[in-house]
Amino acid sequence: MTDQDLASAVFRKEVLAMSAYKVMNAAGMIKLDAMENPYSWPDDIKNRWLETLKDCSLNRYPDPEAGRLVKTIRTVYQLQETAGLLLGNGSDEIIQLLLMALPSGARVLSPDPGFVMYGQISRCLGLNYVGVPLRPDNFDLDLPATLSAIDSHRPSIIFLAYPNNPTGNLFSETSIREIIEKAPGLVVIDEAYEPFAGASYLSSLAKYDKLLVMRTVSKLGLAGLRLGYLAGKPAIIEQINKIRLPYNINILTQASAEFALGNTLLFDEQIRKICTERMVMFNRLSRLNNIRVFPSVANFILFKTGENQADGVFGDLQQQGILIKNLSPQGGLLRDCLRVTIGKPEENAAFLTALEKSLASR
Ligand SMILES: *Cc1c(COP(=O)(O)O)cnc(C)c1O
């Protein structure tokens, strides 16, 4: 028996059919592929942070409920007392927990193109994932198509990224509310990019029992910590909490997030800079011939090249030391599409120069 035969005999067919989530090696490159905040902390803040880490007992297990951090998150984001809260090792883990709690054969629905993890984790768990195409003109929800898919598939969970990744737009509010009203199960509003969009459904939690709001500190500027959270009705959160591993938020993350959320002014300043740069970048991209750029309220911009040129442009940029994300291989509405994360002004300028050069050579 070969190792491959052994693996095939042991593991589920859904797992065998998957390919691993691939992260490109970005060593030495200008990294504009993963929606990271490009700014680090000033030295005085770094030193204060390191001071707090001195008190962490690495020989002990962390607080399984991350009680202090939970309290801080509730205060900083003004969460209603009636809402339940669950922390995850990144919001990716929360998506996994939600899906692991579903019965086998359950259906999961989300707009397409959307965040890849919804489909990837669903398929790996043997659930039925249904992607409903967005409107090709503006990437907004196709409400009739979505309602009809809800009717025929009766999904246990609907994921709506708000703003959407990789398109960068906010779905229309009337469509979202109608979807929440018609949903037979839960609706998760994924607000990973809330810091850049300033729009949220957190205040609607009291109104809809089936609504859950998911957030992360990753895009805010703490991607290395791995911390996400989910707010919703306590009876729902309680069930998901049962399958959460007890120590999913490690002690360094608890302490660091606690510290960082006490310094939100620093992030506000960084976010403001990123949003200003987003406008500069959008305007410059809009002036280029041969590409179509889509408006974004997130910290990235999606654009579309001429037919069959995305791979070439992506390769040219890579050769010039600039890594963005090539979405064209995903096909569908993302054919010929590339996504660039907003970086520091000088990084964005280097990207634009390289892009102009690449487009001029075609
Ligand atoms: C980046 C992203 C996430 C994952 O966030 P982590 O907390 O880093 O796991 C979730 N949802 C969307 C839409 C994202 O773009």
Image (spheres, rainbow, N blue to C red):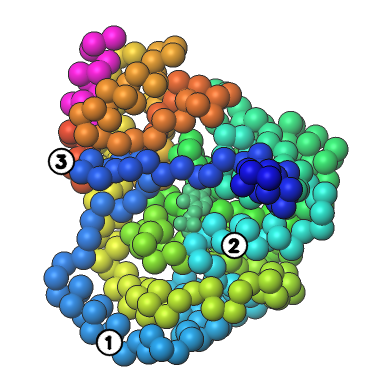
Residue 189 in picture, x, y percent from top left: 60, 54
Q: Which mark is residue 345?
A: none
**Can you say whether 307 is above or below 228 in the image?**
above
User: For the N terminus, which image quadrant?
Assistant: top right
Front one among 223 and 229: 223
Residue in the image at 35% along x and 87% along y: 56
Q: Which residues are magenta?
A: 351-362
Element type where label 2 sits in the image:
helix
The answer to which of marks 2 and 3 sits earlier in the sequence is 2
Amino acid type of disc 2?
Ile
Q: For mark 3, what is the residue?
A: 346
354 falls in the magenta region: yes
Q: Which mark is residue 54?
A: 1
Label 3 crowd bin: few (<14), some (14–19), many (20+), radius 10 Å: few
User: For the C terminus, which image quadrant?
Assistant: top left
Say whether marks 2 and 3 touch (CB < 8 Å): no
Amino acid type of disc 3?
Glu
Q: Is residue 166 left or right of residue 189?
A: left
Say whether marks 2 and 1 touch (CB < 8 Å): no
